[in-house]
Image: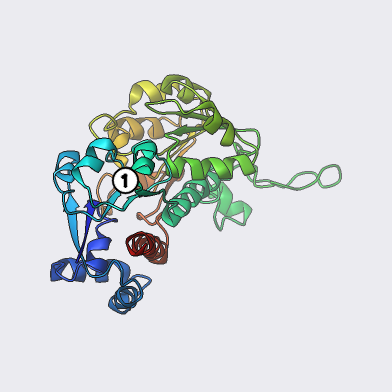
Amino acid sequence: MTTIVVQDDHIIRALSVILDPDCPEDRVDAFEDYYSVDMPEFRKWRDVLRKKYTKVFPATVILTHSQEELDNSLKEADGVVVEDYVFGQKQLDSGPKIKICHNFRTDMRNIDEAACEARGVIVKPFFRRVNVAVGEHAFALMMTLGKKLVETNKLLTIEELQAEGWPARIYNRKHTANSNWARINGIKNMRGSTLGLVGLGSVGREVARWANAFDMKILYTQRNQLSKDLEKQFNASYRPIESLFQESDFISIHVPLNEGTRGMIGRELLEMTQPNTIIVNIARADIIQREALLEYLESGHLGGIGMDVHYQEPGEIDDPFRKYKNAVLSPHIAIGTRVNGAEDMEDIVSNLNDALGS
């Protein structure tokens, strides 16, 4: 039986459900429930994969929770799947049987490709459909807020608009057109606006693709500046985070939550934003300090906030963000259809199967 060593997270551990016949039944039940939103026949789908990819199934799948644990689990490994753990000469020396190192992202900085090539180990980057869906959701939130679609939804009469505080009144049709008779001010154009991306990783790059299609100016900030080639590819210019907050009309958050990013956006940075700046967070809520965000919404300084992630999930009926008309809150659905994740998993299984069968 083959052995696959995997960097554990809530998504990738689906490989253990698919490939490992000794996977705990409660984990199988949990994934069946998780996928049931769009895939009510999850077990049937899993069994089809098992019959289709016989070079990799059955497998012992070892889930590891640290770099050290992964390094210590490679002796009998035939394949490795990582997301940001390092895989290089040390890991190759620890795993003499390894035929494939599969990354769970397109950014390959964590893998020593030259060392793998010299050993004859196949290296696979991975383009996640899920990241495409999340990028789409982030851009949808930006457009929804920029065009004030929620604030004006179904307000079709002068009376309704005026009741909501808009100075609706028809124009003199003898001399002018009547567009925006609702007199909604502050509607933003995407074209020509500046988008600041806090993180230009896999999801941030999907948002950048949309921004380029709308002819936006793109700034980004992150711990390490990208190569000039990558900056050119995404038409993005690096800025320190302070400059990015000062210059951007839209800010979209795309960094993981860790000790370095928890609470990284607070009053100091929010104070630097231009009036009516729109912020979108589809990463993790706690990257932005909750009380500071509420303060700048309440003051009217921010143009709006779009969040698919929240300080408590599921939320509560008295969540203070619900009272703001310029807050668009979705219930953690950016990942899109479960079919995206299922197809991602099948691609990885197929790549492992091909490598182990060669």
- Give residue 13's quadrant in the image: bottom left
Residue 255 visible at all: no
Where does the N terminus fall, quadrant-wise? bottom left
Q: Where in the figure is residue 36, as x and y percent of width and height? A: 31, 72
Q: Where in the figure is residue 333, as x and y percent of width and height? A: 38, 57
Where does the C terminus fall, quadrant-wise? bottom left
The residue that appears at 53% across and 23% down in the rendered structure is 247
The residue that appears at 27% across and 36% down in the rendered structure is 89
Nearest to the observer: residue 342 or residue 247: 342
Nearest to the observer: residue 314 or residue 11: 11
Nearest to the observer: residue 152 or residue 132: 132
Disc 1 marks a residue whose amino acid type is Glu
- Give residue 117's quadrant in the image: top left
Reply above or below: 326 against 80.
above
Reply above or below: 142 against 336.
above
**Where does label 1 land, which residue?**
83
Residue 90 visible at all: yes
Left or right placement of residue 141 versus residue 355 in this view: right
Q: Where in the figure is residue 143, as x and y percent of width and height? A: 55, 46
Nearest to the observer: residue 259 or residue 128: 128
The residue that appears at 39% across and 56% down in the rendered structure is 335
Left or right placement of residue 13 versus residue 239 in this view: left
Reply above or below: 340 against 75.
below
